[in-house]
Amino acid sequence: MLPLLHPAWPLLLGATLTFRALRRGLCRLPLPAHVRTDPLRTWRWHNLLVSFTHSIVSGIWALLCLWQTPEMLVEIETAWSLSGYLLVCFSAGYFIHDTVDIVISRQARASWEYLVHHVMAMGAFFSGIFWKSFVGGGVLTLLVEVSNIFLTMRMMMKINNAQDLLLYRVNKYVNLVMYFLFRLAPQAYLTNFFLQYAGQRTLGSFLLAILLMLDVMILIYFSRLLRSDFCPERVPSQQHKDKFLTE
């Protein structure tokens, strides 16, 4: 079936609209005093609230998918489950929503790295959505959302100037552990798989190219994270001032 006529489009549209409605609802919540005085911080706060919600739901959902269908850990290309398929559609809808939110809020220039990441992620997810291949790989990729729960908490506390809180100091170590377990480790596992097998096929070569670019981005973000939280004296105070992805 041609992608333009694919029944997954209503799922993607529904997921996108769900996140749009969620953002509208979250905008009604009271803002921290330090956030509401700055329009940019206000937008960042609302954007990260949606991201935080997506990370909690998708991270737990990905773990449940692997528990219910453990063959996804091995049969990355062919393993399939309805739950995993819906998860990939759900997360693709989030990336569509967030891309639109960044663009219409005129934050594209400051957040161009986020846009590049989203385009690559959507390109990879669409292979699972429209051709039902590598759904297991998509689920494994979404393990990163477990790490993103703590990464987003960190960014929200920084926006609120709450770096002196005990919660921030504890979270930065938990975030580091989660970064290794749920971001670096799954990414290395998937990269090894695609280098050995999937790179020999047309779709696999496309996904391998995306994966390698994501590898570079993840390592860059990891180095920034280490410098910011563990070597702050090496980070200029104005560096990445307008970027919330790597704060």
Image (cartoon, rainbow, N blue to C red):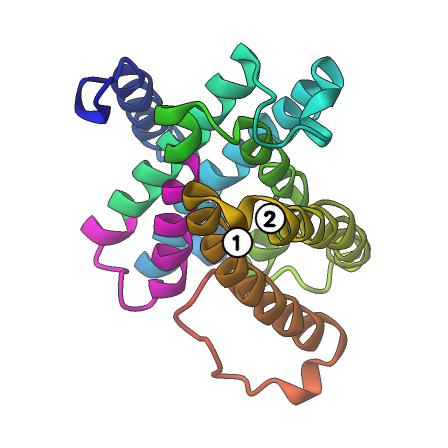
Question: Marks 2 and 1, how far apart in space?
Answer: 9 Å
On residue 225, the disc is none
Q: Give the range drawn in magenta.
A: 102-125
Judge whether residue 38 can be spotted in this image. no
115 drawn magenta: yes
Q: Name the residue under label 1.
A: 211
Judge whether residue 188 can be spotted in this image. yes
Can you say which quadrant of the picture contains the N terminus? top left
| Image spot of residue 193 (x, y percent) | 66, 46
Compared across the picture, whether 112 is left or right of 106 comes to right
Magenta stretch, main secondary structure class: helix
Check disc 1: other Cα within 10 Å, few if <14, some if 14-19, many if 20+. Answer: many
- SS at badge 1: helix
Can you say which quadrant of the picture contains the C terminus? bottom right
Closest to the camera, between mark 2 and mark 1, is: 2
Residue sticking out furthest to the front: 200
Q: Name the residue under label 2.
A: 194
The kind of residue tagged 2 is: Phe
- SS at badge 2: helix
Q: Above or below — where is 230 with respect to 119?
A: below
Compared across the picture, whether 55 is left or right of 36 comes to right
| Image spot of residue 118 (x, y percent) | 39, 49
Q: Quadrant of residue 96?
A: top left
128 or 100: nearer the eye? 128
Q: Residue drawn 44% across and 37% down?
A: 50
The kind of residue tagged 1 is: Leu
Q: Quadrant of residue 164?
A: bottom right
Circle nearer the N terminus (2, 1): 2
94 or 83: nearer the eye? 83
Q: Residue drawn 62% across and 32% down?
A: 76
Q: Residue drawn 35% across and 35% down?
A: 27
